[in-house]
Amino acid sequence: MFSKPIFKQSIQSNWKLWLIITIVASVILSGFIINYDAKGYASIASAAEGTAFSNLLSSMTSLLGSLENFYKLIAVILGIVYVVFTSNNLVVNEVDSGSMAYTLSTPIKRSSVIFTKSFYLILSVTLMYVIISLAGLGASQFKYNNVTGYAITEDIEAVSETLNQNERYISERLYLIQDDEQAMREAATARDMDTDAYSIYLVNIMNDRSYEKAAEIITDERWDIYEDDDDMEDDDIEITSEELIENPAMILSSNDALIAGARVQGISVNEYRQFVTDEIAGPEEKENPKTSVMVTEDNAELLLQTVIDSSAKALNINSNQVNDNLTLIKDSTALEASIEATGLNEEQIITMANHTMVSSARSVDAALEFDTEAYLWLSLGLLTLILVMSSISFFTSTLFNRTGLALAIGGGIPFAFFLITMIQQLMDDSTDALEYLTITSLFDTDAILAGGEFGLGLVALVIIALVLYVASNIIFTKKDLPL
């Protein structure tokens, strides 16, 4: 069935277009990743909230979310260009030009010719998107170190020279920053915080990471115990960091979990055991100065904005300047004005400022997290979608004998699907009606990023591609050719 001469000829005829599309797509994807501005996109998305652009910008508040437009639009149109022209060049162009007559005059069977050409198209598309995906992984790892480790953020970069340590080394040992006053000041400045807020941020990060490591250890131990227990579901066996936060006592039953958690925080096992014990006991009740105003979820945003505005007025600067640098709220003049404007006490205002700064920094960290599994599913979903597009173009290339007709239909259908996708992206109200008019809806990037159900859509794409490729081979083998 497979013919080496036909395969070699297919490569020689199409390698230039393949190389150009592969390089262009890889460069664009890498550019998206390297130039991603987590803090900037978060600010823009917040400003656009409630507008027509809010849905489009909301996805950009995470690194993988920002790639959604690449996977649904840019990578798709580049793939369509490649498969449409390559499909036509492989079959119908040779029929139309008469070169297919020469090919079929050789001892090579017609079935071998079409099988090899379809195999080349499938292989070239697969190799193209594997390389593109690897380029994305490499760019993210190079820029942020978030594929194989914790993301390297601005504070890590700022203190690497001060601590005379590799950035990746510091990102895994944040307690090194905590133990150095100069490093604390430099790191806090890099994250637009003062040392008080940054200290809270570091503690929160290290605590969460210690729970994550402990959860991994406990889960592994439970797998060893319950792996052969048919009554236990996978979700019952797995322990998440959120479950440990709710029930930290589980850590005390595992010495390995205690060791892992202690290593993250840079303390001894006994100190970490005491930390867990304190977490079980709960936070100590603190007496706050009496105030007539309570900060709740409903009024927190309004109170913060009032604090920002009153601080800006007291300091004779713009509110945006205070919003960009919340440490200004802690200025004595600003505090006095904020207390008078809101009725809050000094401690409440400082706590609010610290919480906002820490929350902003944590949102940037979350945006730079790289979910490798979701990324691979995005890449696999994109590959199956492009394979379907290639099967459509290849099918029309074997169905018709004229290049113009095959190109119009084989390229028109995929391009129509692409246009519908663009409309879906820009017009939320049309999504439900148009999703039934395009196969691109089977590649559900939203579900992949959210961890929802998307498997059936990908299976459907694979089946469509398989059916069309098989049909293409049958049609070409049995049809009468104008030779």
Image (cartoon, rainbow, N blue to C red):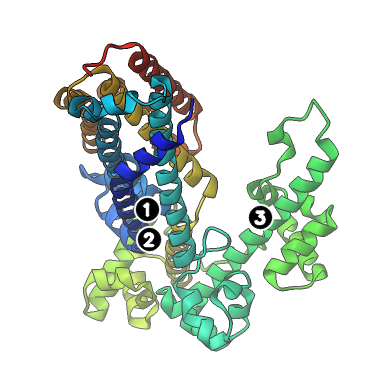
Disc 1 vs disc 2: Cβ atoms closer than 8 Å? Answer: yes
**Looking at the picture, how far across and down is residue 425, in whole percent?**
26, 37
Relative to 77, does residue 344 appear above or below in the rendering?
Answer: below
Inter-mark Cα distance, 3 to 2: 23 Å
Disc 3 vs disc 2: Cβ atoms closer than 8 Å? Answer: no
Question: Callout 1, which amino acid?
Answer: Thr
Disc 3 vs disc 1: Cβ atoms closer than 8 Å? Answer: no
Mark 1 Cα within 10 Å, few/some/many (few <14, many 20+)?
A: many
Q: Which of disc 1 and disc 3 is earlier in sequence?
A: 1
Residue at 66% in and 55% down = 212
Residue at mark 3: 212
Relative to 208, does residue 155 appear above or below in the rendering?
Answer: below
Residue at mark 1: 61
Residue at 55% in and 67% down = 288
- Tag 3 secondary structure: helix
Mark 2 Cα within 10 Å, few/some/many (few <14, many 20+)?
A: some
Depth check, front residue: 60 or 418? 418
Residue 431 seen anywhere in this rendered image of the structure: no
**Looking at the picture, how far across and down is residue 14, in whole percent?**
31, 43
Question: Callout 3, which amino acid?
Answer: Glu
**Looking at the picture, how far across and down is residue 252, in whole percent?**
82, 55
Q: Which of disc 2 and disc 3 is earlier in sequence?
A: 2
- Tag 1 secondary structure: helix
Depth check, front residue: 204 or 256? 256
Residue furthest left as drawn: 404
Residue at 58% in and 82% down = 165
Q: Which of disc 2 and disc 1 is earlier in sequence?
A: 2
Question: Callout 2, which amino acid?
Answer: Ala
Residue 79 seen anywhere in this rendered image of the structure: yes
Find residue 38 and name its label: 2
**Looking at the picture, how far across and down is residue 178, in whole percent?**
60, 79
